[in-house]
Image (spheres, rainbow, N blue to C red):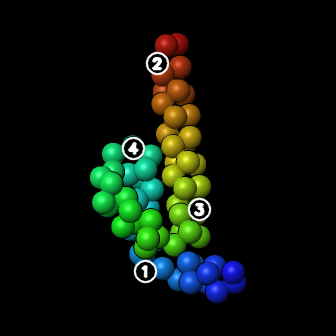
Amino acid sequence: MSDDLRQTSQRKLSFLQTMKAVAWGFFGVRKGAGHREDIARLNPVHVIVAGLLAAALFVTVLVLIVRWAVSSLT
């Protein structure tokens, strides 16, 4: 099991490519073949970090939009 984990964490996609795959996942517009290829090559550690960063960015953008909308009402 330890060898599987080590092998999985040494997959080939860069962090930027992982961010791109996570962004496609957020939008939900990914072709089946590309999705399967990404899953086979993604580094799970990169996916977790990229997902957390994308979620933080998403929440930040939403908060900024709400603040802008509320301030324009007053």
Q: Which residue is mark 1?
A: 12
Residue 48 is left or right of residue 21, and the answer is right
Going from the N terminus, do you reach mark 2 or mark 3 first? Answer: 3
Distance Cα–Cα, label 2 vs label 1: 47 Å
Which residue occupies the foreground of this view, 9 or 64?
A: 9
The residue drawn where x is 39% and y is 44% is 28
Going from the N terminus, do you reach mark 2 or mark 1 first? Answer: 1
> Which percent across, then down, holds residue 6?
62, 84
Q: Which residue is mark 3?
A: 48
42 in relation to 19, above or below: below
Q: Which residue is mark 4?
A: 28
Q: Quadrant of the N terminus?
A: bottom right
Residue 26 is left or right of residue 53, and the answer is left
> Callout 4 environment at 10 Å: few (<14), some (14 to 19), or many (20+)?
few
The mark lying in front, picked from 2 and 1, is: 1
The mark lying in front, picked from 2 and 3, is: 3
The residue drawn where x is 51% and y is 72% is 43
Answer whether labels 4 and 3 touch (C-beta < 8 Å): no
Going from the N terminus, do you reach mark 1 or mark 4 first? Answer: 1
Residue type pointed to by label 1? Lys
Q: Which residue is mark 2?
A: 72
Residue type pointed to by label 4? Gly
Secondary element at image label 2 = helix
Residue type pointed to by label 3? Ile
> Which percent across, then down, holds residue 4?
61, 81
